[in-house]
Amino acid sequence: MKIDRRCFLSLAGGLVVGHLLSPVPWKMTDDIAIWSQNWPWTPVPEDGPVRWKETVCTLCPGGCGVRVRTIRDRVVKIEGKEDHPVNRGSLCPLGYSSIQYLYGPSRVTTPMKRTGERGSGEFEPIGWDAAITEVTRKLGELRQNGKSHKTAVIAGDDRGTVPYLFKRFLEAYGSPNFIRTPSGRDAHETAAYLAQGKSAQNVGFDLENAKYILSFGCGLLDGCGAPGYQFAAYSNFGEDHKLVQVEPRLSNTAARAEKWLPAKPGTEAALALSMASVIIDRGLHNRNFISNHAFGFEDFTDDNGNMHKGFRSLVSEYTPSKAAEITGIDARRIESVAVEFARSDKPVAICGYYESRNTADIDKTLAVHALNALVGNINQAGGMFVFPEPDYDLPEVQKDNAASAGTEKPRADLAGSDQYPQSRYLLNLLPKRILEARNNDLPVEALLVVDANPVYTLEESEKVQEAFEKIPFIVSFSSFMDETAKMADIILPDHHFLEGSRDVPAPAGVGMPVEGFSVPVVDPQYDTRNVGDTIIDIAQEMGGSIGSSFPWDDYGDFLEKALSDRYRDLTRNGYIVNRDRVSGISDAFETDSGSYEFYPTRRHTADNGDTDKLPAYREIEIPGSNTNNAVALVAYQSPRIASGAVANPPFMTKTIDSKTLKEDKLFIQINPETARNLNLKQGDEAVIETPAGKATVRIDLFEGIMPGLAAMPAGLGHTAYSRFIAGKGVNVNALLRALPDPAYGMNTAWGIRAQLTKA
Amino acid sequence: MQKIPSHTKARHFGMVIDVDKCTGCASCMVACYSENNVSFRDEESAKMLSLNWIMVYKLTNGESFPDTEVCYLPQPCMHCDGKEFGKPPCVSVCPAVATDFDWPTGIVSQIYTRCFGCRYCMAACPYHARQFNWWDPVWPADMEKYLSPNVSARTRGVVEKCSFCYHRFQLARQKAYHEGRPEEIGEDEYQTACTQACPSGAITFGDLDNPEHEVYKLKQDRYAFRLLERLNTNPSVYYISKRKWVHRMADNYLEGEVPAAFAENEA
Ligand code: SF4
Ligand code: SF4
Ligand code: SF4
């Protein structure tokens, strides 16, 4: 006999009231039993036919192919797409969590207009037509007053059709101020420009085919760059693969590396140059490449008869023993890694930004690129690739006088100015420029923010917030109520990537000219619009030459024309690989010498003289003062914490262990030795104070971090979104301060000095 | 006692996890939440109260900088066979037969509608594989829409744990049945969500007794071990690591005692 809960409850009832003849208690007991199994507040998800659909995830710049399990009109699961060339079935936790952004309390469900104080988060819904009219009216006014150049766009990327439409809009409207958010790409792009003469191109590393990966701090398995691509490469590692990680903290990447070289932060350039010296000394460099495609390898005399030191002479100064002093890595280890690297069948050297995703150390990047050139792996399988994004064959932008005048004006962020002539975007300088401006002369009076969350991701968040408070008109296109959207006057919400179409440019750092395409897998859940449609609508409503620069019915029509002959394959397969965009070695270099320039002749230096063009180790004095209880605070990435423009979804926060986040208090990692000096113990509450800000944290003792450092995870401490996301820990960006490179303006500070005291 | 109906093929599902390969990314955890309708709350840092069918623990060898090593150990329910086959510690104590050993698969089930929340099984499980629903689950805004119909949502007052994605086995079996091969389920037809999600390929899942399956070979690896092996719980989850200190952490070794995989080397 089977006793289920229903019988069980009936029997129990029977013992008490069994002598009653009335059926009422029996009926009641039966009802209770039924009720106990039918909790009305426990959802019973509707069943239906399962359909798998495929698209591309765009929550981070990783561009992974995904397959989506749908049941009727619901998305119930996301998985990695096996045959997508970027991630080959892999997917990061953010990709798996993306359903929590499709649905849920963080979404902006309809166009919004600010009603309360700026930043108060008080908005009222406003219809699409009214919202667009309001935006065009404001932008029109500025333009009428000859201030069109005071409109700026901040975007998470400058490639792909959506950024293209924004750039096109600014050109027709009359502003030079399209600004990409800082990222690891800045330094790579600059290095490729200097050494290879390639302007604004993708730099990627073919990790899929590389056999020896020498990583100067790139958080390959910590969520940096294109996580799906990197995970896929790692999962295919065999016995003959090696990963060497240079990093002062035993990160997830370092933990899985064959060798971990904990060099002092900021000294990577010395290490790379020293390895180059070992390789050249032992004659392990690729002679064919050096003799046919290199410039400035040997000392040379220029046309004016001036002698210049070449790369060989330069690196001879970085003997392993000298580098050991600088980096703290044993000289013999430096030699053995250098030799292994050069002898490997397919070596590749990469660098990235464990310390902060926003920094750009040009010297380090040039040195790392030079290691690749030394082994001759430029544009070779398993090596370093530089390639342009596909362009669009579209009618010319029509510019009236106002547009021409506006686009001629200097940029608000000083990129391309006499001071920083070779930089393309310097968002990190903008907040200060706004704060220092006299009230009637703000460099930015209208700001459009797309695919970015600068109020959260820029250093010194408090200052950024203050600067944004001063901007008279802010429009956000975010799908989510992020920190920047919260500061906006108008929010014109974009679809979630599962609801709309969009092309996806080659993901950051991927060594392959891949182009993806995401398609809607469900109907829009809310009153949102594809941002491509919104900007076309704005342009058309502005009319005149602006409107006629946007001669498309909608974004779909535009996509078809812009992608022209690639459109069919892209929409059908979800991606294409534009192999023909990679140049062969004979025409790979567009420098004046036509070669790979170990001595980058174009390099702009602060004194604008001829010295210091070669990559070198220059000590970086990070901000803050070096007092008794000072530690150097660095940010670290974790694959379990999304630290980009999109915040950590609840599922990911659930995976964070209680030595990283507990009761909404964030832990910082310090070495037990550091703790002893500061009289701190595991779990202690402490106050960390930097020149940028102050926060209360808890202490986690971790042997795997270099004494003297304190590491804080990036990606927490949000103040917007929803209660499931906000208020957890501290935003490390609020404690950091940028240190502009004297010649390039990008942030070079790998950390900041902080006072750490027991609370 | 014959526990397996004669028409059913006996299988013994299990997992082999390569600890040296796991990066600690937690994709497995998230894929599991999503696959199995695991609910979440706004405060999740009290891990004893947080619902996780698979937890990825960080292990450190304790050496000082820079000789420190870190490994990650993903831990689902071990689907123990028990000292006496078919009697895992948690099953033996359940007064409601809400958790049971499934003979045809070796999977330890959890039947929410039977569970009345006494939590004896949680006390009996040496792996903390089980968690209790202290609260009613809430899916804010319309997050309810992402719930899968294949796994029932739990209520306050019941215990839940990893099921080796049993519904996936059911779906695979149904499919095989419809295709006229009722007992033939291919290795790749039934894989758990975490196995499939692991971007590093650290998890392998299959029939531990089937010589054709990858896990059959892997469990015999020289460096394979199980957690708290000496408690005789007979877990169906194996681990592989070449690091001795990881083996040492997997059981209560005395000082100087050498884990089995390394005994030969040191003899
Ligand atoms: S790595 Fe980025 S693109 Fe890939 S799944 Fe994760 S969030 Fe999406
Ligand atoms: S791990 Fe725990 S819950 Fe799972 S079968 Fe073993 S005793 Fe039961
Ligand atoms: S998904 Fe794989 S690599 Fe990531 S934590 Fe889980 S088992 Fe480890």
Image (cartoon, helix red, strand yellow):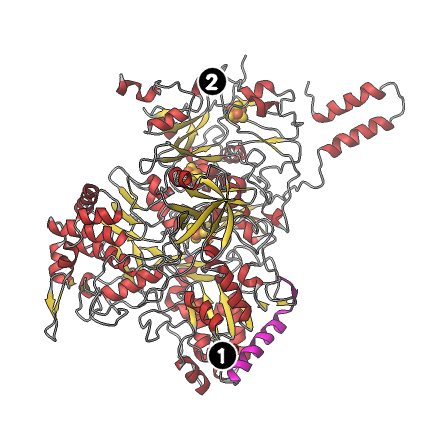
At x 55%, y 63%, the residue is A485
Secondary element at tag 1: helix
Q: Is residue A342 left or right of residue B165?
A: left
Q: Residues within 10 Å of mark 1 (few under 14, many from 20)?
A: few
The answer to whether one can see residue A559 in this image is: no
Secondary element at tag 2: helix
Q: Position of residue A619 (x, y in %)?
A: 28, 56
Q: Residue furthest front?
A: A628
On residue A441, which mark appears?
A: 1
* Quadrant occupied by the N terminus of chain A: top right
In magenta stretch: residue A125: yes
Q: Position of residue A324 (x, y in %)?
A: 22, 46
Marks 1/2 in contact by CB < 8 Å: the verdict is no
Label 2 within 8 A of ligand 2 by Cβ: no
Label 1 within 8 A of ligand 1 by Cβ: no
On residue B248, which mark appears?
A: none
Along the line of sight, which residue is nearer the eye, A354 or B2? A354
Q: Position of residue A60 (x, y in %)?
A: 44, 55
At x 43%, y 51%, the residue is A754
Query: Which amino acid is tagged 1?
Result: Asp
On residue B231, which mark appears?
A: 2
Q: Which residues are magenta?
A: A121-144
In magenta stretch: residue B250: no
Question: Are labels 1 and 2 assigned to the same chain?
Answer: no
In three-dimensional space, the C-alpha distance between marks 1 and 2, rounded to whole angstroms, equals: 75 Å
Magenta-drawn stretch, dominant element (helix, strand or loop): helix
The answer to whether one can see residue A620 in this image is: yes
Q: Position of residue A687 (x, y in %)?
A: 50, 47
